[in-house]
Structures are given as structure tokens and as C-alpha cells.
Image (tube, rainbow, N blue to C red):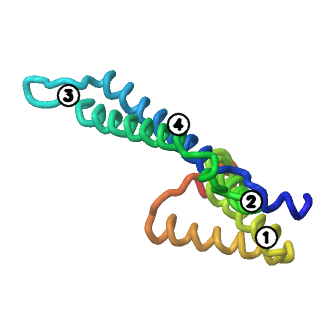
Amino acid sequence: MAEGQEGRAALRYRSAELAVAGFFLALGAVVIYDSVRLGTGWADDGPRPGYFPFYVGLIICVSALVNAVRALLVPAAKNKTFVETGQLKMVLAVLVPTALYVLAVTWIGIYVSSIAFIAFFMRWLGKYAWWKAAAVGIGAAVVFFVIFEKWFQIPLPKGPLESLLGLG
């Protein structure tokens, strides 16, 4: 990619504000919907389970709409860069593998996922040798296993490999 494109705007303030407002509007709508399902009125013994969450969801929705309107009213001259392309790439370089790690924990367990995650980051971003990355990843998983599973007796999510090894 050309040097000039790294500094160009990937997202402007108006777009960022509208995206966040949209997210919170959807979140508030879900809270309101579920509160109505639970009941938002008063029963003989006090408020129904959805009474307070309904009003919290309503406040969230109103706040999101206020922010959306304020974002739409920002003049074009003041709609400055929120994040540049190069900055966004650096954030995504950490965010995407971390999200994949979280998903992998549900399928292959926390230990194997952690070994792969640590080794991947050490190799990719740190440029360490594979053997060093693998050693640190395995070492960290062993330390976490001993601390959580043995000392504190807190079972962490395990996958098929741990089950094969009799750890699950």
C-alpha cells in the first residue's frame, strides 16, 4: 500500500458517532423488548421483573438517538478524522486474532487456544523463532493449568485434546 494511503481517514467522527449510536440503539431496543416480555408494570408485591430494565433501555435508546442527531448536525468542516487507515490496521491486527482466540476457546479449549495465540503473536508481531514462541506458549499453558486446575481447583474450558490426555 502506498505511503499516502496510510494517513488517509478510514473513519470520520460523524461515521463513528453514528455507528456507536446505532449499536446502543439496538442494545436498548433488545433491553426494552425483553423487559416487555418479562412485564414492565407493577404487581401486588412491587415492580415486575422488567420494570427497571425497561426504563434503563429507554434511557439508552433516547441517549443513542440524541447522539445520532448531534452527529448528523456536525458541519462537514468539523467532521475530522476519527481514525486513519494505518491506525485502524494496527487495531485490527490485534482485534481479529483475539476474537478468533475467543471463538477457538469454545471449540478446542483454553489451553490449546492459548498456546496457539501466544505463539502466533510472538512469531508474527515479535518475530521470535518458532521454537521460542512454542516454548513460551506451552509454558504459559502449563502454568495456567497448574494455577487454576490444581491449586485453585477452578476448571477452565477444555477441548478434545485435553480430553484425550485425560485432563478433562
The N terminus lies in quadrant: bottom right
Q: Which residue is mark 1?
A: 125
Real-space Cα separation, disc 2 to disc 4, in angstroms: 25 Å
Picture quadrant where residue 94 is located: bottom right
Question: What whole-number distance in Å separates the C-alpha atoms at marks 4 and 1?
Answer: 33 Å
Helix, strand or loop at label 2? It is: helix
**Foreground: disc 2 or disc 1:** 2
| Of callouts 4 and 1, the N-terminal one | 4
Please report whichever mark, 2 or 4, sits nearer to the chain's N-terminal start: 4
- The circle on residue 93 is 2
Secondary structure of residue under mark 4: helix
**Callout 1–callout 3 Cβ contact below 8 Å:** no
- The residue pinned by badge 3 equals 48
- Residue drawn 82% across and 70% down? 123
Q: Would you name the residue on which mark 4 appears?
A: 22
Whether the residues at callouts 2 and 1 have beta carbons within 8 Å, the answer is yes
Q: Amino acid at mark 3?
A: Arg
Q: Amino acid at mark 2?
A: Ala
Residue 124: horizontal and vertical position, in percent? Answer: 82, 67
